[in-house]
Amino acid sequence: MACIGIIAYILANVVHEGLGHGGACLITGGRPLLITTVNMTCSADNRLVIAGGSLMNAAAAGLFFLIGRKARRISPHLKYFAWLSMTVNLLDAAGYLAFSGIGGFGDWAMFIQGFSPPWAWRMGLSIAGIGAYVLGARWSLLELRPLVGSSAQRYIVARRLCIPPYLAGGTVDCIAAAFNPQGWFLIVMAAAAPTFGGKSALVWGPEWLRGSSLPPGPDAAPVPIRRSWVWIVAGIVIGICFVFVLGPGVHFGEAVAR
């Protein structure tokens, strides 16, 4: 569970910083100068670059939703990975909206700079982000039902599937961010807050399975996910590379001369 979580968290991070911000930078004629686990520096910042991370997380969530619907017949490990990747990308996309609106920091707070009145835009971001986050958490639990079954024990099974990746993925993200060359502020605000705060639905979300607020799934018994050394080794190797390569950052072009 923990190693699959590490891979899903790292993938969501790369999607946000590399494909999202970095891809938007290239599309708009800029050049990525530095990519770390907590930020991407572009030679020509614009609103598409700023929004690119969250937009790509939302797109990735949709892709993993489709993969998850097909993966159950192939492998329960792949089904679980697809569900977890869908969830963390979805929570990232919605969480950034809420975080920027409430705290006035982050991608979407930068996106609305210059918009007037600023308080109205921040309120709008907060409402949209919180609403999307709650809906995303509920949708995630609905998609989790094939893995947890429909018995009275589904809450316990859900916690076993949610807590280990939350702790392991968040810890690896924060360790990698500690190597960030741009200071401790980004470690707290761009690593600890999004990983442990932004993905907190993995902790409190399973509580909804205690009662009847969510309908039972199609199967009475949960799908067993047995220990797989392939996933364990992959999680360890990818986690180490993430910490020691992307943690300090990858420099491009002008950033090397600096």
Image (cartoon, helix red, strand yellow):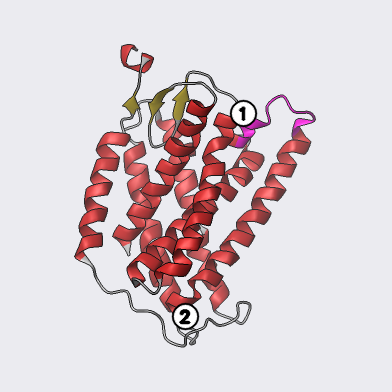
Q: Residue at the location (31% across, 30% down)?
A: 248
- Up the image or down, 3 lies above or below 51; here it is below
**Which numbered mark, 2 or 1, is in the foreground of this view?**
1
Q: Residue furthest top?
A: 257
Residue 117 painted magenta: yes
- Work out whether residue 229 can be spotted: yes
Residue range in magenta is: 108-118
Residue type at tag 2: Arg
Q: Is residue 86 left or right of residue 122?
A: left
- Choose top left, top right, bottom left or bottom right for residue 224: bottom left
Residue type at tag 1: Arg
- Choose top left, top right, bottom left or bottom right for residue 101: top right
In the image, residue 108 lies at what x, y percent? 62, 36
Residue nearest the observer in this picture, 154 or 76: 76
Q: Is residue 221 left or right of residue 95?
A: left
**Other-residue count near label 2 (Cα within 10 Å), few / some / many at <14 / 14–19 / ≥20:** many
Q: Earlier in the sequence, mark 2 or mark 1?
A: 1
- Up the image or down, 245 lies above or below 81; here it is above
- Work out whether residue 198 can be spotted: no
Q: Residue at the location (72% across, 24% down)?
A: 114
Q: Secondary structure at mark 2?
A: helix
- Choose top left, top right, bottom left or bottom right for residue 139: bottom right
Q: Secondary structure at mark 1?
A: helix
In the image, residue 220 lies at what x, y percent? 46, 88
- Up the image or down, 120 lies above or below 134; here it is above
Quadrant containing the N terminus in the rendered view: bottom left
CB atoms of marks 2 and 1 within 8 Å: no
Q: Residue at the location (61% across, 39% down)?
A: 100
Numbered circle sitting on residue 47 = 1
Residue nearest the observer in this picture, 71 or 82: 71
Check disc 2 and report the residue beneath it. 154
In the image, residue 117 lies at what x, y percent? 80, 30
